[in-house]
Image (spheres, helix red, strand yellow):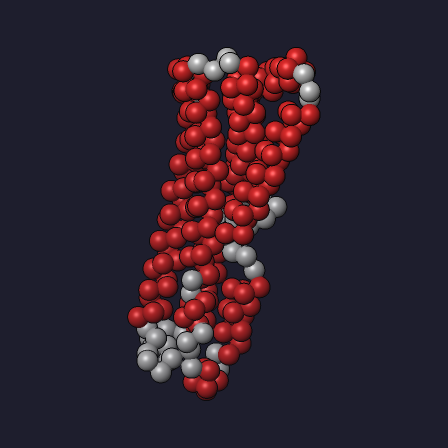
Amino acid sequence: MAGHFVASFVYILPLMLFALLGDCVCAEFDSLYKHLQRHITSDGEIIHRSVEWYRQAHEKLCVLIEMIDEIFAPVVLVGIFASVLEMFMLVFTVSDFLTHGRFTALIAFNEFFWFSFHFGQVCISTVIGIKVNRAAHSILQLLYKLNIPRLKQSGEIPSLSVFLNKLTGNHIGFTCGGLFTIDASAVLTISGTYITYQLLLFQLQKDFGSPTDTTAAVSVFDQIHNVTK
């Protein structure tokens, strides 16, 4: 148990660094949002700065996201995939323990600890991804308030068009191994996938028939579970 607890920090430290960088990026986007908010007049005109200046500032932060994502995208992919798989096996194993009366307090603590750890890892990764995604797109609502005729006079319509295309045409944020951007819709997809296959595993357990077959199947999951730890 002590060894498992210490080994868990191998997963925690990269996740903590990922969360820290994500919060820093969100703070920068929030600062840019508040800066633009302060410099928009009631009639939709930008003072002291231009649309192009905000577009370039936003683009620099997007480049920063891409640099962080190049490092952590594989970590997030492995973390989410491994955690979801581990949660499958933990719930499946606990179900068998309860069925055959081999469930003890020590087993309950061990399984609860690891399930909470893997569930927390998935939650933290997705929450950070959602925060960054929303922060990167938050400035869009301010751009809709700009006075278009004034921008035509100053010749900033091309910059505004490029800015709007960037915000509406792309999903800006951290990705899961480059497969998809982590946003609110991705959380629903992951949750739906987990629930579907967890129910499928329960159905397969029921269809094994005899307790011997069920125990043999669970022993395989136990071996895989111990190897992953």
Could you say which is closer to the camera, residue 58 or residue 34?
34
**Would you say 60 lies left or right of 45 here?**
right
Q: From the viewer's perspective, is residue 96 above or below residue 146? A: above
- Residue at 49% over, 74% down: 160
Q: Position of residue 180 (x, y in %)?
A: 59, 48
Numbered-mark total: 0
Q: Is residue 154 visible?
A: no
**Would you say 203 lies left or right of 153 here?**
right
Choose top left, top right, bottom left or bottom right for residue 84: top right
Could you say which is closer to the camera, residue 185 or residue 167?
185
Q: Position of residue 92 (x, y in %)?
A: 56, 25
Q: From the viewer's perspective, is residue 87 above or below residue 221? A: below
Q: Position of residue 33 (x, y in %)?
A: 37, 64
Could you say which is closer to the camera, residue 200 or residue 7?
200
Choose top left, top right, bottom left or bottom right for residue 44: bottom left
- Residue at 48% over, 78% down: 156
Q: Is residue 123 visible?
A: yes
- Residue at 51% over, 51% down: 183
Could you say which is closer to the camera, residue 202 or residue 136?
202
Q: From the viewer's perspective, is residue 224 above or below residue 148? A: above
Q: Position of residue 229 (x, y in %)?
A: 51, 20
Residue at the farthest left position: 38
- Residue at 59% over, 33% down: 198
Q: Which image quarter holds the N terminus?
A: top left
Q: From the viewer's perspective, is residue 150 above or below residue 21? A: below
